[in-house]
Image (cartoon, coloured by chain):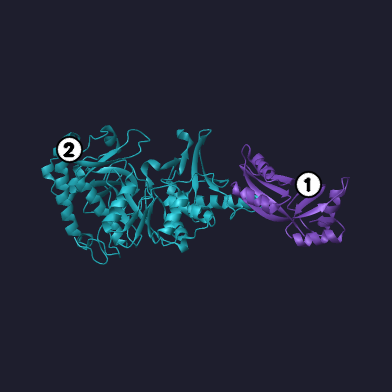
Amino acid sequence: MTANEKFWDAEITTAKRGKIKEIQLERLKKTVNHCYKSNDFYKKRLDSAGVDPDKINSLEDIEKIPFTTKDDLRDNYPFGLFCTPQSEVVRVHASSGTTGNPTVVGYTKNDLDMWAENLARIMYDAGVRKEDVIQISHGFGLFTGGFGFLYAGEKIGSLVIPISGGVTERQLKVMKDYKSTVIACTPSYCLYMAEVAENIGIKFEDLNLKLGFLGGEPWTDSMKDEIEKRLKMKALNSYGLSEVMGPGVSCECLEQNGLHINEDYFIAEIINPDTEKVLKNGEKGELVFTSLTKEAFPVLRYRTKDISYLIDEPCACGKTFIKMAKPIGRSDDMLIIRGVNIFPSQIEEVLMKVKDLEPHYLIVIDRVNYMDKIEVWVEVSEKIFHEKIMDLEFFEKSIEDRLYSSIGIRIKVSLKEPKTIERSEGKARRVWDKRKA
Amino acid sequence: MPIKQLTVFLENKLGRLAEVARILKRENINLQGFSTTEARDYGILRIVVSDSDKAREALKKAGFTTHVADAICVGVEDRPGELLQILDTLTEQKVNIDYIYVIAGTRIVLSVPDIEKAEKILVEKGFRVCQ
């Protein structure tokens, strides 16, 4: 592989579709075999589904393979799904495990290198070079965000600042003094940084930031517009999850209309989450990933619960990898309010377009007298505060009307004092469902 | 000259008004008068204080959303019919009052769409308009 002016690895990222599929099939066979031969769980799973690892003859044969779920990972806690001897594993990462056993994933030396390669390719193709200064405001630790960008940045040869999350005033000082040009963090943290910057008198137009790789939570186009406007940089949607690898599974190119999936390392499918049927390109459903080169922790058809669809059309950037639409949410984040399905991102899309409204919100759901009640909290800043109750009521009502016309149910808007809504340095909490309390 | 009144957005929850009063006391700012208007979940507090700039700064620092608005302040006597005189004068001139309240020193604070015009009317009619 040799980088040219535009692409880290043009030979593969701009290869003909047929060539990519060829690589995928060959690697899929290898991965299924690897899982079957090295891990009891996978052996039993594949046997019981009647899958002969030596009889994977086409990419369509993937549909015979049973799905892997987060519960499978939890049931095999901690190392039960590792497919290499533990002596080959050089690293673990894990989810926080707030709702049960954490999910633990492992990496061999090759896996770590492959991870770096995946993300370096994405970043290079978006314009990151040796000369860049990358500020990583993702947490380091068991979360994959920080380390993924560290390896990738170093692989490109950029200067990496592993500042991690939090201590926002210091973040901004570092950003200014070290002249950071690229940032990796969650989108909600970007907006929090914008707020703190305003308070301490730092202007983004005076900084060097040009590009952000933002991920770790679903976010909308209107939030992207807000971030780009306030941080004066291009905000790219970066997608990854530790179960599959970490950041670097897919990311937007500078065209910003879909996230190219690193298809030589992963096969993506979209399924109907209820029937588990594979859907066609363009149809919305749950994202499912199969890893193609991983050694310590390969995954076969891992159900991500992220809702998206695949976009199989030529991209102006020149890459030939298929794209996934930015995830609109997770299937378990979907709210059912009086029988209507709503994703928090739909509400966000509306709120972010309201002039002068602070980009922080919390959706609060409750059941009163057997009726679901949904309201969204937003904060009253000086920009929207006028001295009359009427003006505030009119403001509430105008947002309620916009929510209604876009989502189809009445959502009460509730005005709160500034800073009522918790600011996030990592993944933002957008929903407070009191029905579950 | 209109007076400056400070408007504060308050959520309808325990202790918020007390917090405002506490900040004013700490800053040694005299609260000359106030009124509240309530919606369901929040309210607006209007205050007239000895130093509105200082009060606003302190409240902002404590995280309150504030707004400064002009209002007319008229001194009255503590006797029957005083309010009516003002109201009759403004009504005759077709000036509608948005809100009105009393502050210490027997003064009435009121707001109308066109403050300058209403103030002129009141001064011409001999009312004691305070600054």
Q: Is residue A406 left or right of residue A314?
A: right
The image position of residue A345, as x and y in percent, is 43, 49
Q: Nearer the viewer, residue B79 or A406?
A: B79
Chain B's colour is purple
Looking at the rendered structure, the kind of residue marked 2 is: Pro
The image position of residue A337, as x and y in percent, is 46, 41
Disc 1 on helix, strand or loop?
strand
Q: Is residue A41 left or right of residue B39?
A: left
Q: Nearer the viewer, residue B87 or A190?
A: A190
Q: Is residue A76 left or right of residue A399?
A: left
The image position of residue A146, as x and y in percent, is 34, 48
Q: Nearer the viewer, residue A246 or A14?
A: A246
Q: Tell me the residue at 16%/51% (across/down).
A: A25
Chain A's colour is cyan
Which is closer to the viewer, label 1 or label 2? 2
Alpha carbons under labels 1 and 2: distance apart: 81 Å
Q: Chain of mark 2?
A: A
The residue singled out by tag 2 in the image is: A85
The residue singled out by tag 1 in the image is: B102
Q: What is the crowding at mark 1: few (fewer than 14 residues within 10 Å), some, or many (at least 20)?
A: some
